[in-house]
Amino acid sequence: MTKGITRRHALGLIAGASILPHVAQAAGMEAISGQAFGTSWQLVALPEADFGLSSKRSSEAVGTEINTLFAKIDRQFSPYRGDSLISQFNATHDGAFLQDKDFELVTQKALHIAKQSEGFFDPTVGPLVARWGFGPITTGDTPDWRGITAGPKGVGKTSGALTLDLCGIAKGWALDEGSRKLHALGLEDFLFDLGGELVAFGTHPSGRDWRVAIESAAADRPSPAALRLPSGMAVATSGITAQSYMLRAMTYGHIIDPRRGAQVQGRLRSVSVISEDAATADGWATALFAAGDKFGPEMAQAMELAAVFVFADGETRHTRAMAGFLV
């Protein structure tokens, strides 16, 4: 067995396939970048004169603010850290509650997507992911998202052996939080990329919407689709191109079908979802990929999601809701 990845002890290990920024090289466009969650982030915005940055909010200062925020989120949601909130929760017994507003909000969103997707998105899937060679949560009960609660008392569980793995949604949440921070700093027009998930606000310097291109399922093929991202919209992709290994001529990726307890196989290589927030796009991209090449497109259509599916042979399919975002 030859593995095509390294184990990166951060949220980024569970990142989906990349979405590549397709940004025109406008003169003087400002770009800031950094590292977080075992992956990279990049902020592309208007030239400095229009960037909303005073000496107090220089490019360097904005980068520091984002890195500080992402470090906080890593301490909350990384299952690779023994001192993170999620690791503390996973070590608690049944009947105990962890009280943290952000942790509660992300868990509530994860449970909502789990219910809507009929369990194809399951935030308790960590032990199964580790069993197939991905992820750090090596012990725990059989996944059952219904055993997790999130409410006024905090986040709890019905069995002490249940564990949470929010990597399938936490990177999207981090991107949303980062965007809120940028707005607070006075930025209005920007494209923000975190490990291949993107959120757009305002417009491109040319006055049009921002545009991005979906990564091809094969290195020798062009991008299968270009997408238009209106202000306030986010796109996330899940797939097996970024993290996979070969065994007996079969490709195995990190995304698990929680209902079968096995890795997703078939022709499907990636799913991209556009939504009004990155956390929702992140969770649904994971769910639709886990649902597979037949039921995934059917579910996306039924849920009226803006989604595009890329298959191993280069074929693409998109939902009716995605049509308006295609360039």
Image (spheres, helix red, strand yellow):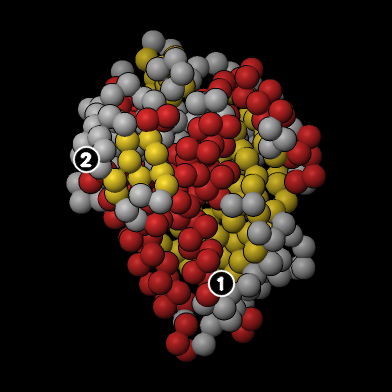
Spatial CA span between label 1 and label 2? 36 Å
Q: Is residue 270 visible?
A: no
Of 212 and 64, nearer the camera is 64
Query: Residue, x 24% and y 29% (percent of image)?
Result: 161
User: On screen, 269 above or below 277?
Assistant: above
Of 239 and 280, nearer the camera is 280
Q: Residue furthest top?
A: 248
Quarter that holds the N terminus? top left
In the rendered image, residue 79, in percent from the top left (x then y), is placed at 29, 42
Q: Residue furthest bottom?
A: 55
- Which comes before the other along the chain, label 1 or label 2? 2
Query: Residue, x 44% and y 15% (percent of image)?
Result: 260
Query: Residue, x 53% and y 38% (percent of image)?
Result: 112
Q: Give the number of the mark in front: 1 or 2.
A: 2
Query: For numbered disc 1, what is the local secondary structure?
Result: helix
User: On screen, 38 above or below 263?
Assistant: below
Residue that label 2 marks? 92
Of 237 and 129, nearer the camera is 129
Of 243 and 323, nearer the camera is 323
User: On screen, 63 above or below 308?
Assistant: below
Query: Residue, x 55% and y 50% (percent of image)?
Result: 278
In the rendered image, residue 295, in percent from the top left (x then y), is placed at 63, 19
User: On screen, 67 above or below 96?
Assistant: below
In the rendered image, residue 187, in percent from the top left (x then y), is placed at 58, 74
As drawn, the label of residue 183 is: 1
In the rendered image, residue 175, in percent from the top left (x then y), is placed at 50, 56
Q: Amino acid at mark 1?
A: His
Q: What is the quadrant of residue 207 in the picture?
A: bottom right
Q: Amino acid at mark 2?
A: Thr
